[in-house]
Structures are given as structure tokens and as C-alpha cells.
Image (spheres, rainbow, N blue to C red):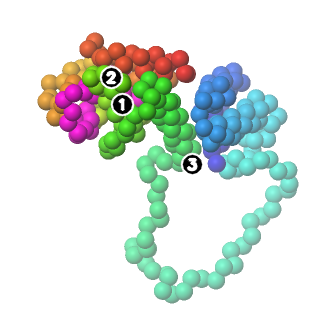
Amino acid sequence: MPSYYELLEVAPTASADEIKRAFRREIARYHPDKVQHLGKEFQEIAAVKAAELTQAYKTLSDETLRAEYDELPASGAAPVHQPSAPPAPDVRPPPPAAARRPEAERAPEPVPPSGASVFHQERAGASDLVQKATIARFRQVLGTEFGRYEEAPLAGFQVTCVPKPAFFSMKFPPRVLGRFVPQVDATAITETWAMAARMKKDKQRDLCVFVLGPAVASPRELATAIAEQRQKPMPAGGKLVMVPVNTRTWAAHVPQDAPPVVKSLLTRLKSSA
């Protein structure tokens, strides 16, 4: 399990004020008001995470408890007051001869990915929760905007929305793709554009692509990347509109020629936050 310091993303030497600020920052991500529109599963995960953060804060904000915690092994187990005992001798029999292979022939121990740790795995789980919550909100907004819609799965996208035209209307609403990425930058724009270009051709509809992520590059970098991609032909037919979105604030980089439905969807996303 990650240590209390890792949960709060502070150094072991952090001051009381730094710990308090870190707790307020982290606990806000799992506040019931922010997950009440999600499914029961997500609400339960958020509740567990909030409880872990609260326990970490209570321990590290109390001088006595923190001192006891700092004396614990790195496992982060609860403090147990008992006299230390010398380690038991290793009395296991030696391995069979077949197992005593030369060092060079032994299979290497499994090594976690570069930079990986239990803490990183925990953060990856939290990131997965954020992604699922973001996609769930995006789907909810699409349903509110279009009513029922069809999905045409496309590799690389969590959402592929093909709305049906309004009754007695000959105008087809644009198709909408949604992709969640950790970092919305020039690389993500280039990759997403290439994947969206594989969408089935439909000259009657524009294609609005929302690139959603909690970290977003500068407007200048995004505008430059989109301008470069727009110089390429669009094999999927119609116009492709790329919309980078910051999922922390729901602020977006909206192209001037974006159809009205883009602004409508963004307004709904902000209002549901």
C-alpha cells in the first residue's frame, strides 16, 4: 500500500500547513457532490479513497501519531507496540541440484515498468476512475443533447456518437467522437486526428472530435497542431472539428467554425460539473 505521504503527495518532511493544503486538494476530488451523478460503483470507490485520505491526514496532522508512524517500516502498517525480536534463522533446506543453476542461467526477476511502484499503480487506478467518470459524464450530456443515438465503434475512442436527424428534418447533426488522454497536447492532437480520419465516410455530416484530459497544453500549441492537421485531406467526408477540453475546468479550445452543437455540449458539461 502507498504510504500516507504518497497518498497526500507530500514529502516526509512536509510541514503541517503543507499537509493540510494537500489534504484539502486531494479530498476535493472525491467529494460526494462531484460523484453523485456517477454510478454506485464509482461512488463507493470515491468513498473508500476519501476515507484513506482522511486517515492519512488525521495521522500526519497529529505530532504524536506522526512520530509513531514515521518509526514504522515502509509498509505503512498500523503501529504495533511490542518489543523487537531478532529475526528467525533461515532453516529452509537447500534447493534441489536442478534448481541450483548458475547465476547467468537463472531467469531474471520480474522488474516493474520504469518508474513503477505501488504508489504509481494506485495513482493509475485513480486516473482510471477519473477517465471512467469523465466518459460517463460525456455520454450523459450526449444523451441529453441528442436523445437516442447510435454508436459506431472506432479504435482509440471511448465514445462514438452518431445522432439521428430530428423528425421531419433533412439536416443531419454532426457525428461526435470522444477520446480521453492524460495530456492534451500536440502529440495527442496528431494521434487523435489520424484515428478520427479512419471514420466511415459520410459527406452529409461533420465530425466533431472531443479530446478530453486533465492536463492541457497552451492554446498556441493546440492551435498550431490543429492548423497543421487541417492541411491534410479528410477521407471520412465532411469537416473535422477538433475540440481540446480540460476536464478539470471544462474549458475548451473551440475553433471558430465549430457547429453550434459543440458549444451546446460544452455548456452542458460545465453545468453538470
216 in magenta: yes
| Earlier sequence position, callout 3 versus callout 1 | 3
Label 1 sits on a secondary structure element that is strand
Q: Nearer the viewer, mark 2 or mark 3?
A: 2
Picture residue at 43% right of the left edge, 33% below the top: 148
Q: Identify the image quadrant of residue 231.
A: top left
Between the residue at mark 1 and the residue at mark 2, the CA separation in whole angstroms equals 15 Å
Between the residue at mark 3 and the residue at mark 1, the CA separation in whole angstroms equals 42 Å
State the image coordinates of residue 183 (x, y, percent, origin top left).
39, 31
Q: Which amino acid does the dot numbered 3 rest on?
A: Val
Eyeballing the image, is 154 above or below 180?
Answer: below
Q: Point out the residue furthest to the front here.
A: 168
Label 2 sits on a secondary structure element that is loop
Instruction: From the image, tell me which residue sits under label 1.
Output: 163
State the image coordinates of residue 268 (x, y, percent, origin top left).
48, 19
Eyeballing the image, is 244 above or below 11?
Answer: above
Q: Which amino acid does the dot numbered 1 rest on?
A: Pro
39 in magenta: no
Give the total of numbered labels.
3
Binning the other alpha carbons within 10 Å of mark 3 as few (below 14), some (14 to 19) or many (20 upward) gives: few
Q: Point out the residue furthest to the bottom here.
A: 97
Q: Which mark is residue 201?
A: none
Q: Is residue 186 rendered to the left or right of residue 25?
A: left
Q: Nearer the viewer, mark 1 or mark 2?
A: 2
| Earlier sequence position, callout 2 versus callout 3 | 3
Bounds of the magenta span? 193-218
Question: Is there a contact, CB below 8 Å, between mark 3 and mark 1?
Answer: no
Q: Which mark is residue 118?
A: 3
Instruction: From the image, tell me which residue sits under label 2.
Output: 168
Q: Point out the residue furthest to the right here.
A: 82
Label 3 sits on a secondary structure element that is helix
